[in-house]
């Protein structure tokens, strides 16, 4: 069984341990909200999934204003429960062996992650939340079955070839290109700057090594105490006047004067990093994982659509 299953199931089980609020009278809990091939989905099932979020919504939307967001939440959960039941029903048509010992080890791991040192402590925590170890075990098994069914379907649907991988790399160059970046220091002289400031700034093209000192003394711009250092800036994000002045980037060169509405700027290029496209070999691994993750998502959605198209689903709310 994959590590993805391990972590997904661990998170699922951990969510079952905290105690929740009393959801309401038993009669209401047995109200049927939907059915899937004749199998009911009750209000009680839905509230087990929604009660914590409903409590939060009631805090955010007091009074009647909470009704619509709560109903929208319950509709989403009903749809999720329909999908789960469809997958479990599909499993029952052609069941296969599920490693139950894996579920048991996951329960033990969840107990440890929750700060519970034994099964007996876990059982006490479950009882306090109105649940039982057996109910947790059934939920865990259902989760494993669903993941197994999605994985089996993905084996049929997902077959990413090296050619497809390279074609994607070729057709999406921007995803694998680090943009051109410039590290700039900036000196701003406002229109009322002193004659001494203007004279000092005028010498910077010939003496760029004085830029830091002159900026600390006279600049009205940002980062004055740091010599006007702005850090790295992507060329595409430069204001038009600066981009025009820096058409030919040369490190350690001072550019200016650049006249603007707020004053006169001098720019020192302290470092330059041209645009670079990563080689295919550098990105092939992460790219494969990204594309396969998307293909698995599409496979899962396609599988659920097919199950729904063959099912008798009734909404009763």
Image: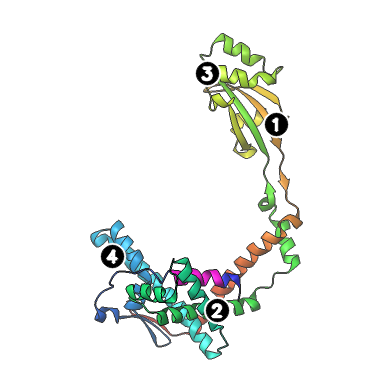
| Residue 283 marker | none
- Mark 3 vs 4: CB contact within 8 A: no
Residue 66 sits in quarter: bottom left
Q: How is colour applied across the structure in the image?
A: rainbow
Label 4 secondary element = helix
N-terminal of the pair, mark 3 or mark 1, is 3
Q: Which residues are magenta?
A: 6-14
Q: Are marks 3 and 1 in contact (CB under 8 Å)?
A: no
Residue at 49 percent across and 83 percent down: it is: 88
Q: Of the numbered discs in the image, which one, if any, rests on residue 67? A: 4
Q: Earlier in the sequence, mark 1 or mark 2?
A: 2
Give the quadrant of residue 294.
bottom right
N-terminal-most mark, 3 or 4: 4
Label 1's element?
A: loop
Give the mark nearer the N terminus: 2 vs 3: 2
Circles 2 and 4 in contact, beta carbons < 8 Å: no
Residue sitting at x 54%, y 11%? 194
């Amino acid at each position: 069984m994959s590590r993805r299953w391990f972590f997904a199931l661990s998170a699922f089980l951990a969510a079952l341990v905290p105690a929740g609020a009393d959801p309401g009278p038993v009669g209401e809990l047995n109200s049927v909200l939907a059915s899937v091939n004749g199998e009911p989905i009750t209000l009680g099932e839905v509230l087990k999934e929604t009660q914590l979020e409903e409590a939060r919504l009631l805090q955010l939307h007091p009074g009647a204003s909470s009704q619509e967001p709560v109903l929208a939440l319950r509709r989403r959960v009903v749809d999720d429960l329909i999908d789960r039941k469809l997958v479990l029903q599909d499993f029952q048509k052609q069941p296969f062996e599920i490693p139950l010992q894996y579920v048991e080890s996951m329960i033990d791991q969840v107990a440890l992650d929750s700060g519970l040192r034994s099964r007996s402590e876990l059982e006490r925590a479950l009882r306090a939340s109105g649940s039982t170890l057996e109910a947790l075990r059934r939920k865990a098994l259902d989760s494993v079955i669903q993941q197994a069914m999605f994985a089996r379907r993905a084996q049929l649907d997902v077959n990413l070839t090296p050619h497809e991988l390279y074609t994607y790399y070729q057709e999406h160059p921007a995803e694998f290109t680090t943009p051109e970046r410039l590290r700039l220091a900036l000196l701003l002289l406002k229109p009322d700057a002193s004659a001494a400031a203007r004279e000092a700034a005028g010498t910077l093209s010939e003496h760029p090594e004085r830029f830091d000192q002159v900026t600390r003394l006279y600049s009205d711009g940002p980062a004055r105490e740091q010599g006007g250092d702005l850090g790295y800036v992507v060329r595409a994000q430069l204001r038009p006047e600066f981009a025009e002045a820096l058409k030919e980037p040369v490190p350690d060169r001072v550019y200016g004067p650049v006249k603007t509405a707020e004053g006169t700027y001098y720019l020192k290029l302290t470092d330059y990093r041209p645009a670079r496209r990563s080689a295919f070999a550098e990105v092939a691994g992460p790219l494969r994982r990204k594309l396969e993750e998307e293909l698995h998502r599409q496979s899962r959605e396609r599988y659920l659509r097919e199950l729904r198209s063959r099912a008798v689903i009734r909404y009763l709310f």
